[in-house]
């Protein structure tokens, strides 16, 4: 492999991209394949203590009394602590952001004091020599309660009959209104107006590895080392420092292997903060791993939106205006530090996103309820915005008697219309909706499928085809969180070091949760430096080692971290050539690096093995000129700035068969066309897209956290909460268009959330297409057999 | 003190004897007593399959079997089968096809896949999907896993 020239996307030039664009297997996957990874629960430290939490059985209750006597006397128990005791060591937090005007939330403690606001909120911590002993002792805690009125339904919460936090005045955490003007007039003049209400069930991430933290306080140094399954080590370093009162330099956060995250592991969790505080209090390492049952009660949930949407359309099929009213419930607290206002905000920002109408009005309310907290989970707001946009678009096409694909062709923003400003204010650098639609229709053989559909309908087989176009927020700039006052880094850094053996070590602030970040960085580093990929070692997830940065979230790792690696790689190559030039007494411009050798730029003749260059630079610098100092460790950073986000676009299609007798949906096939800019590793990108699609399918068909009227979670276990299994998933065909962002040399945008963003809308439209002959329609996810049979009026 | 039993079993070819609490399940025993942390705990109620290990040649959920029930048994875990090269072909195919992301489900998934290879017959993609439906993967779309298993079981590229 050769080296990567810059920029990778220079117009009209053919550049050597090295490993970039190659389906290289992930070097770091070998340990995972042998069960030799290092997940938090695999770590063993001397004097390690284990914590288990006493969690509220009630959705809303005042704690009259907590009696720890029996628990304290139980075998192996080291200590039992309530909220007040832990609060001595851990300051509470308030999750608001300056740019979400008016957002409010009460202070939240690591362990609740006086009152539980959702079923599962931690009220006491038991630390013992083993987890089982801690759990045994939890069962011995005696509590007396005064049950309080429970607010479960979001419409009721909005009416504010019962105020969960009286000091806030009402149950509204955040609201937003957006109006371009002219919306009423547009609707009054429109040839066709369609409207519908969509419901999105509450669901959660179900990372196969539960949330996990091992906090190790060193009293002599007043330092804290935290091994944590987190997506954002530097953010957590800052938070541990400020809330636990330890200088930031004394806090080190290490994220080794992380067993799935999907946004679940980027938030501050009270039980994890308590674990860190307990390590300080007990002056020994303490570990907490959420078991599956408490994961359902304490991992953030997401979605739970009710959205009314209206669409104004001309008789020729042109979309004129969107009108939106979104209501979402987030539990009793906004989640720290990103807040729980972002998902609703995204729905407002993104609805109608692929289309070229100019009139848009949106109203959105975020309300408190006595259920588990919700916050940012994979694709944040996108699945909602996409599904309701594409659902209402299909309804309009149906009303006009137009083919859904043709209707989209008329309305998608033209590929030559960029840069483009969307009515919500978002700016798009360059998208490729029409190319994507054409590629999708060709890949899926759309006309053939439509013919087959009509043929099968005659035989009483009801198939449906659903399409969902989308835009997606990736590579966020500081406009996402930083401007609101959150200490969340939008920039990332990479350090590259040439080792004496000619190897290159890469240290990057973006983390790895299995998506293949480290492999992508190895590809970029090898290509930028001019070495083979087996000579690269990548280290991520350690605040004590890597440059400062944001980590992994909002589809930013490859685009931002990758650019930092590329820039650092180029700088290291240049510095290596300085050494070579000094050794060879040649001009640097006559030299190049290729396949682990310094070579003559023109003849490609091998001049020096990089191991020899390393040997001389580190061990025999006395042989180099007196005024020469080698610099074989370089660091570069990257921040996206010109656009708030590097928007991507994509389009998905789903083919389903609905059994109209049983209500069961069989997924026959799924297609996904995505334009995420430069693709670094197609194999990794495709399977990440597929994984995202499967999570989106889960939302559409299976997954829902079902609550009873008393605020009790009714299906908080893996047997009752349905996660997509291999047997019911279809083959998923992926295809790509590459429109690199010109904001970076690498040109990569994000891709990690695209599948999840588009799949629910595509599946919904496919089901409704199948139900069309029955004049039946479903709009409440998940589309269970029961809901489909109800729509068919069979139950 | 809770009830405890003495057990002797063969784990990855080595005889081990321990006194174990009667309530301790097999995967806790393997992880906490023997330090074999390759078998993972995903749900502890028999659904996700992350703790799948082999007992007397059959795959079992390590969270649904007690350690005391393994007395006298032969237990194989991901670590042992990796060293014995029994999983080599599957591991290679999983690696080359990126049939894993976070890797938490992977040891259990490989155990289930290995079980399928033992049947020595060709299988359809649907049969592979059905066979691994007791092993949840939350990262991949399952497709690369199915591809990798198909390659090994049916011997095709």
Image: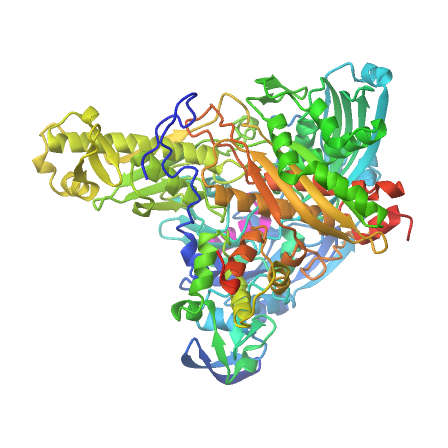
Residue at x-position 31% and y-position 36%:
A2
Q: Quadrant of the N terminus of chain A?
A: top left
| Quarter location, residue A419 | top right
Q: Position of residue A22 (x, y in %)?
A: 42, 41
Relative placement, left or right, of A733 versus A450 is left
Q: Is residue A267 in the magenta section?
A: yes
Using the image as rendered, state which of residue B59 and residue B128 is in the foreground.
Answer: B128
For residue A50, above or below residue A612: below
Q: Position of residue A65 (x, y in %)?
A: 70, 58
Relative placement, left or right, of A201 versus A208 is right
| Model colouring | rainbow
Q: Is residue A777 in the magenta section?
A: no
Q: How many marks?
A: 0
For residue A232, above or below residue A104: below
For the question of whether residue A284 can be seen, the reply is: no
Residue at x-position 29% and y-position 36%:
A530
| Quarter location, residue A356 | top right
Q: Position of residue A494 (x, y in %)?
A: 37, 36
Residue at x-position 12% and y-position 37%:
A621
Using the image as rendered, state which of residue B33 and residue A646 is in the foreground.
Answer: A646
Relative placement, left or right, of A223 versus A345 is left
Residue at x-position 47% and y-position 70%:
B77
Magenta: main secondary structure: helix
For the question of whether residue A458 can be seen, the reply is: yes
Relative placement, left or right, of A564 versus A576 is right
For residue B76, above or below residue A664: below
Instruction: Give the magenta range.
Output: A264-284
Q: Position of residue B103 (x, y in %)?
A: 49, 56
| Quarter location, residue A609 | top left
For residue A723, above or below residue A409: below
Using the image as rendered, state which of residue A265 and residue A435 is in the foreground.
Answer: A435
């Amino acid at each position: 492999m050769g080296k990567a020239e810059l920029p990778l996307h220079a117009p009209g030039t053919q550049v050597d991209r090295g490993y970039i664009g190659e389906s290289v297997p992930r070097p770091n996957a070998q340990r995972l394949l042998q069960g030799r990874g290092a997940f938090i629960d695999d770590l063993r430290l001397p004097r390690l203590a284990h914590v288990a939490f006493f969690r509220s059985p009630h959705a809303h209750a005042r704690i009259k009394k907590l009696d720890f006597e029996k628990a304290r006397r139980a075998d192996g128990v080291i200590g039992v602590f309530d909220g007040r005791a832990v609060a001595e060591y851990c300051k509470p937090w308030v999750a608001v952001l300056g740019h979400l005007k008016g957002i409010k939330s009460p202070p939240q403690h690591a362990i609740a004091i006086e009152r539980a606001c959702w079923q599962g909120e931690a009220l006491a911590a038991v630390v013992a020599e083993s987890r089982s002993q801690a759990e045994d002792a939890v069962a011995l805690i005696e509590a007396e309660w005064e049950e309080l009125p429970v607010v479960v339904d979001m419409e009721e919460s909005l009416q504010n009959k019962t105020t969960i936090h009286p000091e806030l005045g009402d149950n509204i955490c955040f609201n937003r209104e957006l109006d371009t003007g002219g919306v009423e007039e547009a609707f009054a003049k429109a040839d066709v107006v369609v409207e519908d209400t969509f419901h999105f069930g509450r669901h959660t991430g179900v990372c196969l590895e539960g949330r996990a933290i091992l906090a190790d306080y060193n009293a002599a140094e007043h330092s804290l080392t935290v091994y944590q399954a987190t997506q954002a080590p530097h953010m957590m370093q800052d938070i541990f420092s400020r809330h636990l009162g330890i200088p930031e330099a004394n806090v080190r956060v290490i994220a080794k292997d992380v067993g799935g995250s999907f946004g679940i592991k980027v938030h501050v969790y009270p039980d994890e903060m308590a674990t860190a505080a307990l390590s300080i209090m007990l002056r020994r390492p303490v570990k907490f791993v959420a078991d599956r049952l408490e994961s359902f009660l304490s991992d953030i949930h997401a979605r739970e939106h009710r959205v009314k949407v209206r669409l104004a359309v001309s008789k020729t099929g042109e979309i004129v205006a969107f009108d939106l009213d979104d209501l979402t419930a987030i539990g009793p607290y906004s989640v720290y530090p990103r807040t729980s206002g972002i998902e609703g905000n995204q729905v407002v920002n993104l609805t109608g996103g692929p289309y070229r109408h100019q009139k848009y009005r949106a109203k959105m309310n975020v309300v408190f309820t006595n259920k588990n907290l919700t916050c940012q989970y994979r694709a944040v707001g996108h699945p909602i915005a996409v599904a309701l946009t594409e659902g209402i678009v299909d309804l309009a096409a149906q009303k006009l008697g137009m083919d859904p694909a043709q209707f989209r062709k008329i309305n998608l923003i033209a590929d030559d219309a960029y840069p483009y400003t969307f009515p919500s204010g978002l700016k798009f650098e360059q998208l490729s909706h029409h190319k994507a639609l054409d590629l999708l229709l060709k890949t899926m053989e759309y006309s053939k499928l439509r013919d087959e559909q009509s043929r099968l309908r005659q035989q009483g087989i009801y198939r449906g085809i659903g399409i969902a176009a989308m835009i997606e927020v990736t590579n966020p700039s500081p406009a996402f969180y930083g401007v609101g006052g959150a200490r969340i880094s939008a920039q990332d850094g990479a350090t590259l070091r040439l080792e004496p053996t000619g190897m290159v070590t890469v240290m990057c602030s973006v983390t790895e949760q299995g998506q293949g970040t480290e492999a992508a960085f190895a590809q970029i580093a090898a290509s930028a430096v001019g070495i083979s990929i087996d000579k690269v070692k990548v280290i991520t997830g350690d605040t004590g080692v890597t440059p400062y940065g944001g980590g992994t979230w909002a589809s930013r790792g490859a685009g931002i971290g990758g650019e930092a690696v590329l820039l650092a790689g180029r700088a290291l190559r240049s510095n290596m050539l300085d050494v070579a030039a000094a050794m060879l007494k040649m001009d640097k411009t006559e030299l190049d690096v290729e396949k682990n050798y310094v070579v003559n730029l023109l003849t490609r003749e091998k001049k020096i093995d990089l191991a020899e260059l390393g040997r001389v630079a580190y061990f025999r610098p006395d042989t180099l000129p007196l005024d020469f100092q080698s610099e074989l460790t370089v660091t570069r950073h990257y921040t996206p700035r010109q656009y708030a986000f590097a928007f991507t676009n994509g389009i998905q299609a789903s083919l389903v068969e609905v059994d109209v007798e049983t209500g069961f949906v069989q997924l026959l096939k799924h297609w996904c066309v995505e334009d995420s800019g430069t693709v670094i590793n197609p194999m990794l990108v495709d399977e990440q897209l597929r994984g995202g699609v499967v999570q989106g399918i889960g939302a559409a068909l299976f997954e829902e956290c079902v609550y009873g009227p008393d605020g009790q979670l009714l299906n908080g276990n893996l047997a009752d909460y349905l996660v997509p299994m291999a047997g019911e998933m279809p083959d998923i065909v992926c295809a790509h268009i590459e429109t690199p962002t010109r904001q970076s040399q690498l040109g990569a945008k994000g891709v990690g959330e695209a599948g999840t963003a588009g799949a629910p809308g595509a599946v919904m439209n496919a089901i409704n297409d199948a139900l069309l002959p029955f004049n039946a329609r479903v709009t409440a996810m998940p589309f269970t057999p029961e809901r489909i049979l109800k729509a068919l009026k069979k139950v | 003190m809770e009830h405890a039993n003495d057990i002797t079993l063969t784990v990855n070819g080595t005889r081990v004897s321990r006194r174990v609490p009667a309530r301790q399940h097999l995967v806790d025993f393997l992880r906490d007593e023997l330090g074999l942390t390759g078998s993972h705990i995903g749900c502890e109620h028999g659904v996700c399959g992350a703790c799948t290990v082999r007992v007397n040649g059959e795959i079992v959920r390590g969270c649904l079997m007690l350690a005391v029930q393994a007395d006298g048994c032969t237990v194989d875990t991901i670590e042992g089968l990796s060293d014995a090269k029994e999983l080599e072909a599957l591991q290679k195919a999983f690696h080359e096809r990126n049939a894993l992301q976070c890797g938490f489900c992977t040891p259990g998934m490989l155990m289930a896949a290995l079980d399928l290879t033992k049947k020595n017959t060709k299988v359809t993609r649907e049969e592979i999907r059905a066979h691994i439906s007791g092993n949840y993967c939350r990262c991949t779309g399952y497709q690369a896993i199915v591809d990798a298993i198909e390659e090994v079981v049916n011997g095709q590229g």
